[in-house]
Image (spheres, helix red, strand yellow):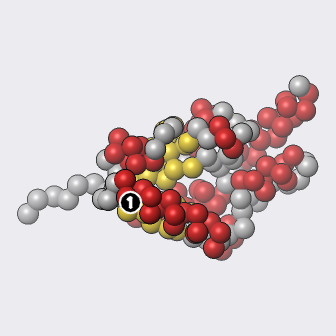
Amino acid sequence: MSARPPSIAIYPGTFDPLTLGHEDIIRRAARLFDHVVLGVAESLGKKPIFAREERMDVAREALADLDNVTVTGFGGLLVEFAKLHQARVVVRGVRSVTDFDYEFQMAGMNKQMMPELETIFMTPSDEYQYVSGTLVREIARMDGDIGRFVGPTVARRLRERLAADRKA
């Protein structure tokens, strides 16, 4: 009997900032797959607060306790990123019907380009269902407490970045 190849999943996103909801999905995916590649997308169109390298650093720090998670950046087509990492699964977090509608369309397009690529939709745990990076950024810009939505590293870096932006 031959050994099965390791199960490799990719979890792509901008992660600007990495929220506790993202961490929840990553940690749960890490229990399901032999290896998870967190793909931090360039996403210039979204005008991220943090540069991709900064987002990768934050993710590496937050997920340092997970031996089977690798954080790397990517640009271009998701299917090419999946092929590069020999992944056959894309993990996507969905919080709402709106998220699902968009992700469902993306999964279909990816399936057309790479038929062997499967997309698995995961909902965040109950306490993170409503957390979004957009809302976290908005709360932070208004000096609100974001500690219940992001980890300590993210909260500190976000406060520092916004303070520096205000001085500029």
x 37%, y 53%: residue: 113
x 56%, y 42%: residue: 41
Q: Position of residue 119 (x, y in %)?
A: 43, 63
Instruction: Give the answer, above or below, for where 151 lies relative to 52.
Output: below
The outermost residue toward the left is 1
Residue 15 horizontal side relative to residue 8, left or right: right
Q: Position of residue 129 (x, y in %)?
A: 67, 69
Task: Tally the marks.
Answer: 1
On the question of residue 132 being in view, the answer is yes
x 30%, y 59%: residue: 116
User: Looking at the figure, which quarter contains the N terminus?
Assistant: bottom left
Amino acid beneath label 1 = Lys
On the question of residue 36 being in view, the answer is no
x 51%, y 67%: residue: 104
Instruction: Give the answer, above or below, for where 128 lies relative to 14.
Output: below
User: Looking at the figure, which quarter contains the C terminus?
Assistant: top right
Find numbered disc 1 in the image and state the secondary structure of the residue it sits on: helix
Q: Position of residue 38 (x, y in %)?
A: 49, 47
Of residue 108 and residue 53, the one placed in the foreground of this image is 108
Residue 160 horizontal side relative to residue 44, left or right: right
Of residue 27 and residue 18, the one placed in the foreground of this image is 18
Q: How many residues crowd around disc 1 within 10 Å: few (fewer than 14), some, or many (20 or more)?
A: some
Say which quarter of the image contains residue 96. Answer: bottom right
Residue 77 horizontal side relative to residue 17, left or right: left
Q: Which residue in the structure is indicated by mark 1?
A: 111
Q: Position of residue 94 (x, y in %)?
A: 59, 67
Residue 123 horizontal side relative to residue 17, left or right: left
